[in-house]
Amino acid sequence: MAIRNPMSERAWRRHANPYSGATRMLAGAALLSALYRHAWKSLGAVIGFLVLNPVLFPEPEDTDNWLSEGVLGERAWITDGHPMFGTDYPEVLNTVNVPLYLYTLYAAYRRYPLRTLVGFLVTFALKMAFVDAMARYYRDRDDLR
C-alpha cells in the first residue's frame, strides 16, 4: 500500500538542502545521547529540531550532491507510489531499521553503552544505504533532473 506524500512540495525542496540532511543525521546521534544521559530537556529540544528540520533550511541553489539527490529521490519514490516499508530492496532497509532503532532507543534509555553504539552504527549504515538507493533512483530518472 502506497502512502500519501507527507510533505508539501515546498517543504521537500527545502528539505533537499544538504544541511538539512547532514544536521538531521547528527541529530539522530544527539537524540540517543540525550536519552542515554536522561537529559529530558535536551531530548525535547532534539525532537523539536527533528520535527522542524525539513523546513528550517532554505531551498538549495544546487542539488547536485548526494544528500539532496537522496531527498529528491525519496520524494519521487513516494510520489511514484512505491512503499517505504516492505520486503523488497530498498524498502527492506526501512523495515529492518525501525525495530532496530526502537531497540537502540531502549538500549540508550537503559544505558547499555555497547548495545547503544552498535545499534546506532547499524541503523546509521542502513539509513545511509537507503539514502544512497534514493539518490540512485533520482539519478536514474531523466525526467526528474
Image (cartoon, helix red, strand yellow):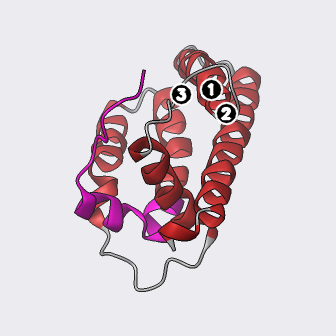
- Circle 1 sits on which residue? 97
Which of the numbered marks, if any, corresponds to residue 36?
A: 3
At 76% from the left and 25% from the top, the residue drawn is: 114
At 29% from the left and 40% from the top, the residue drawn is: 6
Residue 27 highlighted magenta (yes or no): no
Q: Quadrant of residue 87?
A: top right
Side of 29 where 43 appears, left or right: left
* Disc 2 to disc 3: CB gap under 8 Å: no
Q: Measured from the top left, where is residue 76 in percent x and y? A: 46, 52
Quarter that holds the N terminus: top left
What's the magenta region? 1-22
- Above or below 39: residue 11: below
Q: Measured from the top left, where is residue 15 in percent x and y? A: 37, 61
- Above or below 128: residue 55: below
At 73% from the left and 37% from the top, the residue drawn is: 121
- Above or below 110: residue 8: below
**Amino acid type, label 3:** Tyr
**Residue at disc 1, secondary structure:** helix
Which of the numbered marks, if any, corresponds to residue 123?
A: 2
Most foreground residue, 15 or 24: 15
* Disc 1 to disc 2: CB gap under 8 Å: yes
Marks 1/2: CA–CA distance: 6 Å
